[in-house]
Image (cartoon, rainbow, N blue to C red):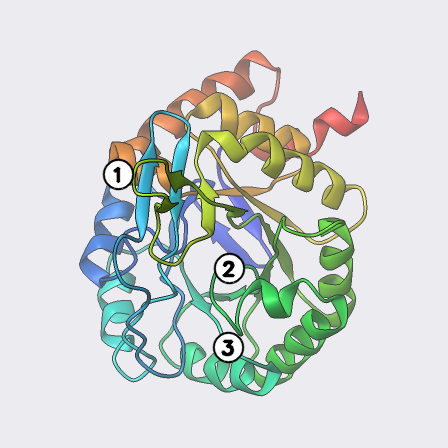
């Protein structure tokens, strides 16, 4: 029987696929349901200092089987209100990774201290949202600014720090290198790809915000390429995200260098049952590939 357990920067995951940030992370109840559905852990919704309503509707548009376009605007209840949701999620018994976003290094550090107090097992820094002015990729696409944030958070907390980087740049691996040098314990790659759609009848963008981020199967080749490039240039663990819909997708990410995975759009379209399905299929792929455990397969495509 293939051993699917893995470890990311000291965080033990009984199974490698986690709930991605922004999907089902609004409440502790929904995060706990993801764990009961087979997730090896959960990443919370990205939380800021103050409550944020986000953008007006429409904020999400589904495009057949190949993905979803969204511009939510980082809506969240704020750090004062969210700890009770984390407490509920922790009761499910799986690791909880707290996702945070801020406008500068100081705000990230303050949020990191407050998130650590909730009992989460690690922090994921949202340095990659493509559609929130003053946040996300506006900070994270600059290696120097990204490094400043990572250093500030590492100074403020003892928790493992996962830096979630953007694909919307000429060299995502350069950002990963900057994060590693600043002290990041792991890299999460990738966030959504900047994109938009226009309604030809109304002659205006489909999303109220205009542009947004594309997720789902269409971005898997982009996420896979980013993980491949990052694996060749950093030594810290990589958490692969982007278009993972089944066990074959997960297996490809592992072969490219991912030690753990996050599922987002697949959960939104198939529900939490997708975790059990992906893990079962991944186990079969690993067995067929001659790997007794997931760890042995990490980055194997680079060795051939």
In the picture, measured across the screen, residue 267 lies left or right of residue 117, that is left
Q: Determine which quarter of the picture holds residue 222.
A: top right
Front residue of 90 and 168: 168
> How many C-alpha atoms fall within 10 Å of the one at disc 3: few (<14), some, or many (≥20)?
many
Whether residue 40 is visible, yes or no, is no
- Residue at 49% x, 30% y is 218
- Residue at mark 1: 272
- Residue at mark 2: 129
| Quadrant of the rendering where the C terminus is positioned | top right
Find residue 109 and report its horizontal and vertical position in percent: 55, 83
Pick out the residue farthest to the top.
288
Distance between mark 2 and mark 3 Cα atoms: 11 Å
Whether residue 147 is visible, yes or no, is yes
Front residue of 286 and 222: 222
Front residue of 22 and 259: 22
Q: Determine which quarter of the picture holds residue 62.
A: top left
Mark 2 or mark 3: whose residue is earlier in sequence: 3
For numbered disc 2, what is the local secondary structure?
loop
Residue 102, numbered label = 3
Distance between mark 2 and mark 1 Cα atoms: 24 Å
Distance between mark 1 and mark 3 Cα atoms: 29 Å
């Amino acid at each position: 029987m293939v051993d699917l357990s893995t470890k990311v920067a000291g965080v033990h995951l009984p199974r490698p696929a986690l709930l991605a940030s922004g999907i089902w992370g609004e409440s502790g109840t929904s995060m706990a349901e993801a764990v009961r559905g087979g997730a090896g852990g959960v990443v919370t919704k990205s939380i800021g200092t103050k409550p944020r309503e986000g953008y007006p509707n429409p904020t999400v548009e589904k495009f057949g089987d190949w993905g979803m376009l969204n511009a939510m605007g980082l809506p969240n209840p704020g750090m004062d209100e969210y700890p009770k949701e984390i407490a509920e999620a922790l009761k499910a018994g799986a690791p909880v990774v707290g996702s945070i976003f801020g406008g500068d290094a100081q705000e990230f550090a303050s949020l990191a201290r407050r998130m650590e107090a909730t009992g989460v097992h690690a922090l994921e820094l949202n340095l990659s949202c493509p559609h929130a002015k003053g946040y996300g990729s506006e900070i994270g696409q600059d290696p120097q600014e990204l490094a400043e944030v990572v250093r500030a958070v590492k100074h403020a907390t003892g928790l493992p720090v996962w830096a979630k980087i953007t694909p919307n740049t000429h060299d995502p691996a350069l950002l990963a290198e900057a994060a590693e040098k600043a002290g990041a314990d792991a890299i999460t790659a990738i966030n959504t790809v900047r994109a938009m759609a226009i309604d030809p009848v109304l002659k205006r963008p489909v999303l109220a915000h205009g542009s947004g981020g594309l997720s789902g199967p269409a971005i898997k080749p982009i996420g896979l390429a980013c993980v491949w490039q990052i694996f060749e240039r950093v030594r810290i663990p990589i958490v692969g995200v982007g278009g993972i819909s089944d066990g074959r997708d997960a297996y490809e990410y592992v072969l490219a260098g991912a030690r753990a995975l996050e599922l987002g759009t697949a959960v939104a379209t198939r529900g939490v049952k997708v975790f059990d399905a992906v893990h079962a299929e991944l186990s079969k792929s690993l067995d067929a590939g001659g790997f007794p455990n997931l760890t042995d397969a990490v980055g194997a495509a680079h060795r051939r």
